[in-house]
Amino acid sequence: MYIVDLINKKRMNGKFNKNEIKYIVDSYVQGKIEDYQMSALLMAICINGLDSEETIYLTDAMLDSGDKIDLSSIPGIKVDKHSTGGVGDKTTLIVLPIVASLGVPVAKMSGRGLGYTGGTIDKLESIPGFNVNLNISDFINQVKKYNICIGTTTSSITPADKKIYALRDVTGTVSSKSLIAASIMSKKLATGADKILLDVKYGNGALLNDMNDAIDLAKLMVYIGNSHGKETRALITNMNYPLGNMVGNALEVKEAIDVLTGGGNKDLRDLCITLASYMVSMSKNSDFMSAQGEVLSSLRTGKAYQKFLELVKLQGGNINSINISSKIIEIKSTKSGFINNISAISIAEAALKLGSGRMTKNDTIDMSVGIETLKNVGDYVNIGDSLAKIYVGSKEIDYNIVLNAFEISDSKIEKEPIIYGIIK
């Protein structure tokens, strides 16, 4: 095979067979295909797409490029959760302790963030001492004994995806639904869970802006998971405004604790209860309402919060030493009216400028900075009311970015629901 012929085939909207996709992935990992050639191929895929069969072939090729984790020694049905990401998405920190407190084993491999805010691993590392770099044996043993562990993925898991994603990130080829689906599902399948729950987000703060695109992506990933014998479901959720009130690593840990102790933002709490209920239902083969009753009981009795504290202690963290910046700038409203939107992307851009995220993998995150929104969509505000707090570190920003994120008008617009629906 010749890579130029394959580039031309997809440029002309041809269909790849299994051997051709395996050749492309294996040859690129081995350095036999140059970056500029792979870039051309990825752009052709972005323009002309892959069908569902081609996407499964690509998923399999990336899955087979590295090691797979065997969780079969852990008793019970293991359910993994993955979110396509968004502004203020700290659901893993809340959902996993709830689920584990109900006897469901959760073995979670997560990543660091590249973009506006940190990923799950960055948020956990804002807890001083928290160790995410466990070897596979210790990772599995912790889940066996305590039902919960969160670690970072190793370089040996889907190395093809890592190399291809790094190239997509700098060549404008991230937004292909087929490439997104293969990337996510190859990692989920490699990390060994029996069943998979996906949180697929749409909106201006998400990877995909359009809800219909998110639905298409969700259907594709559910198809891939089910085709591999893994029961897979996907929630379609709204990311037009930030999830919760906190954006920033240590701040988001604080908000996770708020929810686990009975408080917190209603949208965030409702989404976490729904995600946890589906995970429990899938693991125990029970109906959703029964699972939801267990989830609510775990929150009400404090079992979920105690499991969170146990997780932090097991992995060496000191929750009492978490650092949030004491330099706070308050943003006040310059008009009266109803808050009809809080732009997720604007809040994210402000958080990035503060230092809460990284634009290259070598950037250092300031864990202590971020933004707290004090009002929610649908609230009425007067001139002079506080809209947000900005937790500032060493970097100054234009505070108008945060002020202008709040869309205020005389008439109230009906708020979009946080959850659109479920795809099975």
Image (spheres, grey):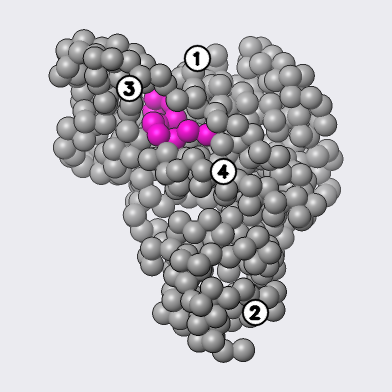
Q: Between 343 and 420, which is closer to the camera in this rendering?
A: 420
CA distance for labels 1 and 4: 31 Å
Which quadrant would the C terminus be assigned to in this image? top right
Q: Is residue 418 visible?
A: yes
Residue at 65 percent across and 28 percent down: it is 276
Name the element at disc 4.
helix
Residue at 50 percent across and 86 percent down: it is 4
Taking the image as shown, residue 310 lies to the left or right of residue 240, namely: right
Q: Which of marks 1 and 4 is in front?
A: 4
Residue 250 is situated, as x and y percent measured from the top left of the image, at: 41, 33
Mark 3 nearby-residue class (10 Å; few <14, some 14–19, many ≥20) = many
Looking at numbered disc 3 in the image, what kind of residue is underneath it?
A: Asn
| Residue that carries the numbered disc 3 in the rendered image | 340
| Residue that carries the numbered disc 2 in the rendered image | 20
Residue at 58 percent across and 65 percent down: it is 50
- Up-down relation of residue 74 to residue 283 (above or below): below
Name the element at disc 3.
strand
- Residue 282 location, quadrant: top right
- Up-down relation of residue 165 to residue 416 (above or below): below
Taking the image as shown, residue 304 lies to the left or right of residue 237, namely: right
Q: Are marks 3 and 2 in contact (CB under 8 Å)?
A: no
Taking the image as shown, residue 344 lies to the left or right of residue 354, namely: right
Looking at numbered disc 2 in the image, what kind of residue is underneath it?
A: Glu
Residue at 79 percent across and 24 percent down: it is 287
Looking at numbered disc 4 in the image, what kind of residue is underneath it?
A: Ile
CA distance for labels 4 and 3: 24 Å
- Up-down relation of residue 20 to residue 417 (above or below): below
Q: Give the range drawn in magenta.
A: 237-246
Q: Between 386 and 132, which is closer to the camera in this rendering?
A: 386
Name the element at disc 1.
loop
